[in-house]
Amino acid sequence: MIELRELTRLYGDTVAVDRLSFRVDAGETLVLVGDSGCGKTTTLKMINRLVEPSSGQILVDGDDVTSVPGHLLRRRIGYAFQAVGLFPHMTVSENVGVTPRLLGWERERIEERVDALLRRVELEPADYRGRWPHELSGGQQQRVGIARALAAEPELLLLDEPFGALDPLTRDRLQRWFQGLRRELSLTVVFVTHDMVEALLIGDRIAVLRAGRLVQVGRPAELLRAPADDRVAELLATPRRQSEVFERLLAREPT
């Protein structure tokens, strides 16, 4: 579905992404993790050409993304991020339908697609279609943001810390909801997070980045069994410690 070949991005003398190569199969969710500044978000932005690579190649379904004008490419790729970015002067319906309108869809088709997506993200169209973004909770805004990313039936979904600003209960609920949604729709997803627990829960595979380079990529169990180095092991230590604490608490005899 998607392949990065020796992808590099320079900002002056600073190397943000350094000869990065990986592939994501159709229907797979690959999670990018690593410290702040490791190149996760820059990589995501290069995939849909919000940032142009300094060198290297990105292929989607075997086609080089530079063969398509950037604005047309972005209409084929769904994109959602932590700040949501809903247009405050547009209703929920107008926000979700913005890309289909740019693509010239007929009004009736857009309205049907918007209502179907709102139901899919568990927001009843009759109740939410006409609301403004400021009238929504954080979790509802994230759902609308994902609905908007899916509106034009994209072949690829890019998610940049989509649940990072939410409270723990809402975040857990949306993580579980998203897992069901992406399996139901057979979505191909590149998902950025700094939270290793989230990466382990959501990813089919996890790619660990450091200083713009790929340190390790593999299935969650592979990383847990055989971390590539001490830093990867350190990233995995937090979920291990949390699991061990829960096990100890459950094992305690009542007093």
Image: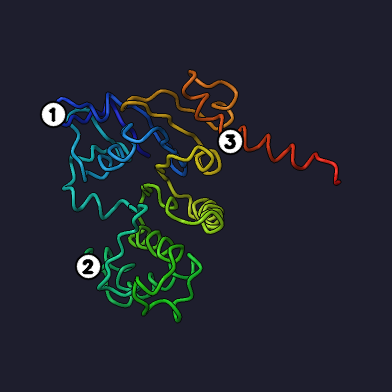
**Residue at x-position 53% and y-position 31%:** 219
Does dot 3 land on a helix, a strand or a loop? helix
Secondary structure, mark 2, is: loop
Q: For the residue marked with disc 3, what is the amino acid?
A: Pro
Q: CA distance from mark 3 to mark 1?
A: 37 Å
In the displayed structure, 240 sits above or below 29; it is above
| Residue of label 2 | 104
Counting residues from the start of the chain, the first of labels 2 and 3 encountered is: 2
Q: Is residue 44 left or right of residue 182?
A: left
The colour scheme applied to this rendered structure is rainbow
Which of pointers 2 and 1 lies earlier in the amino acid sequence? 1
- Give the total number of marks visible in the rendering: 3
Crowding around mark 1 (Cα neighbors within 10 Å: few <14, some 14 to 19, many 20+) is few
Q: Quadrant of residue 7?
A: top left
The tag on residue 12 is 1
Give me the C-alpha separation between circle 2 and circle 1. 40 Å
Q: Amino acid at mark 1?
A: Gly
Quarter of the figure with the N terminus: top left
Residue pictured at 34% horizontal, 75% vertical: 132
Q: Which residue is mark 3?
A: 239
State which quadrant residue 194 falls in. Answer: top left
Which residue is nearer to you in this view: 68 or 162? Answer: 162
Name the residue type under label 2.
Gly
CA distance for labels 2 and 3: 46 Å
Residues at badges 2 and 1 in contact (C-beta under 8 Å)?
no
Other residues around mark 3 within 10 Å, as few (<14) / some (14–19) / many (≥20): some
Residue 178, image x, y percentages? 50, 54
